[in-house]
Image: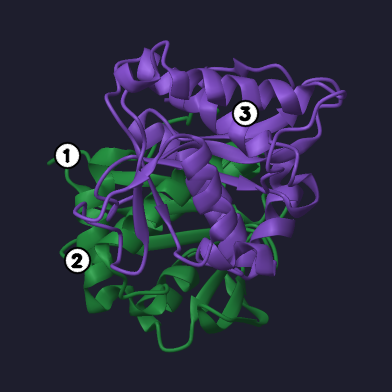
Chain colours: A purple, B green
Amino acid sequence: MPTANIPVLETRRLILRGPEPQDYPDFKATFTSYRARFMGGPLNPYEAWMLYAAEIGHWAIRGYGMWMIHDRISDATYGMAGGWKPAGWPEAELAWVIWPDAQGRGIALEAAHAVRGYFYRNGWQGMVSYLDPKNLDSIRLAERLGAIKDHAAPSVDGNDAVYRHPSPAQLDGTQLAHGIEMEIGHYTDPLFKPKGWALD
Amino acid sequence: MMSVPALETPRLLLRAPGPGDFAPLAAFYASPRSRFVGGPASADQTWRMLAGEIGHWSLRGFGRWAVQERATGATAGIVGLWYPHDWPEPEIGWDLFDGFQGRGFATEAARAARDHAYDTLGWTTAISLVADGNDASAAVAGRLGARPDGRFRHERFGEMTIYRHPGPDARKGDA
C-alpha cells in the first residue's frame, strides 16, 4: 500500500498519519536512546534510519503498519502506534512507542485504542502485544486496554510475554470498552484525573 | 509513498522492489555472496531490509530497484541509488544474486541507475562504496569509469573504498 494511501485516523486529541520524512528526527531521538531498550535498541543512526524506512515498507508489504501520532492542533509528534508483523512475528501485534517527553498523558492509550478499533472494524478478529517482562509501563498499558497474558501463545523469541487483546465482541458495548473510553475521557478533561494515574 | 519509475535496458527491467522479491533476497543474504554488503543475514533480518529498501524510496524520493532479467523474468539483483542516514554521499549500489554474475548485469543496471540520477534527479556527482576484498564489485566500478576517491568506514559494513563516478558530462567516455 503506498504511503499516500495510508488511512488517517482521528481521535479526540490526536491525528494518526503514515510516517513522513520530516518526522524522522523525532523517531531517531527515541530509538537511539535508552528509551528504546525494550524495542531492540538503542540503535545507531544507520539502524534507526533503516528501521524508519522499514516502518514505511511494512505498509507496502503487509497493507498495514505503524502510524505516526500527531497532536491534532500543534501537529507535534508523540510517538507511533499500529499493527506490526515483520517476518518472525507469530501474529500481528498491536504495537506502540511514545516519545519520553510525551508520556503520562494517556496518548498511547488513546492511539492504541483507536488503531485496534480500526483493525477490528476492518475484519480483524484479534491482536497481541509482545512485551518485554521488564517493560512495566507497556504491560500496564496492555492491561488497561483489556489484554491478558497468554501463556500458551508463541512469543517472538522466547524472552517476551504475549498479551492477547480482547476480541471485537469483548469490546462491543461492554463494561471493558466503557472503561477504556472513560479513562481516555478523563485524560482529555482538565478537571478530572484518572484513578491510579497510570504511566505510559 | 511515491511511485517508483521503471527503467529498461537491453536485457534488464529495473522496477519497484516488492514482496515478491523476498525469496531471492533472502537466498542472497543467506549466501556467502552477501559477505561484502552486511551479510550473511537471517530471513527475518532480510525481511526488514526489503522493507527498508521500499521505505528508502519514500524517505529520499529515490532508491534501489529490483533488477529483473527480461528474458526469464527472474530477479537478478538489487541495484540503484542509496542514501541512508550517515552515508557519506548518495551512492550507486549493486547487489547481484547468485547465478547472474559474469554477464555484465551489474554494470548495465548501474549505468541505467546513474543515468536516472544525472538526467532525471539532477545529481552532479555520484559515488559507489566497495568493501575491501570485493574485487568483483571494484571491477564493476571500474567498468563504469569510477575511480578510487577516499575511504569510508561504517560500523556495520566495515572498511570501504569510495569510488567516484564520472560526472554527467564525462560519463560518455567511460570504458
Q: CA distance from mark 1 to mark 2?
A: 15 Å
Instruction: Report whether mark 1 lies on the same chain as mark 2.
Output: yes
Mark 2 and mark 3 on one chain: no
Separation (CA) of disc 2 from disc 3: 48 Å
A78 or B6: nearer the viewer = A78
Chain under disc 3: A
The image quarter containing residue B117 is top right
**Above or below A20: residue B137:** below
Q: Quadrant of residue B86?
A: bottom right
Q: Which residue is mark 2?
A: B98
What secondary structure is marked by label 1?
Answer: loop
Give residue A24's position: percent from left, percent from top. Answer: 70, 47
Between A157 and A17, the one nearer to me in the picture? A157
The residue type indicated by label 2 comes to Asp
Where disc 2 sits, the SS reads loop
- Where residue B118 appears, x then y in whole percent? 64, 44
Q: Residue at x 71, y 33 (%)?
A: A194
Residue occupying image coordinates x 30% and y 56%: B105
Q: Where does label 1 land, which residue?
A: B73
Q: Nearer the viewer, residue B98 or A181?
A: A181
Q: Is residue B82 visible?
A: no
Circle 3 SS class: helix
Query: Crowdedness of circle 2 by 10 Å Cα count: few (<14), some, many (20+)?
Result: some
Left or right: B19 with respect to A36? left
Is the residue under label 3 in contact with that under label 2 (CB below 8 Å)?
no
Residue located 66% across and 56% down the image: B170
Mark 1: few/some/many CA within 10 Å (<14, 14-19, 20+): few
Label drawn at residue A110: 3
Q: Is residue A7 left or right of residue B38?
A: right
Q: Are marks 1 and 3 in contact (CB under 8 Å)?
A: no
Residue at 35% over, 30% down: A166
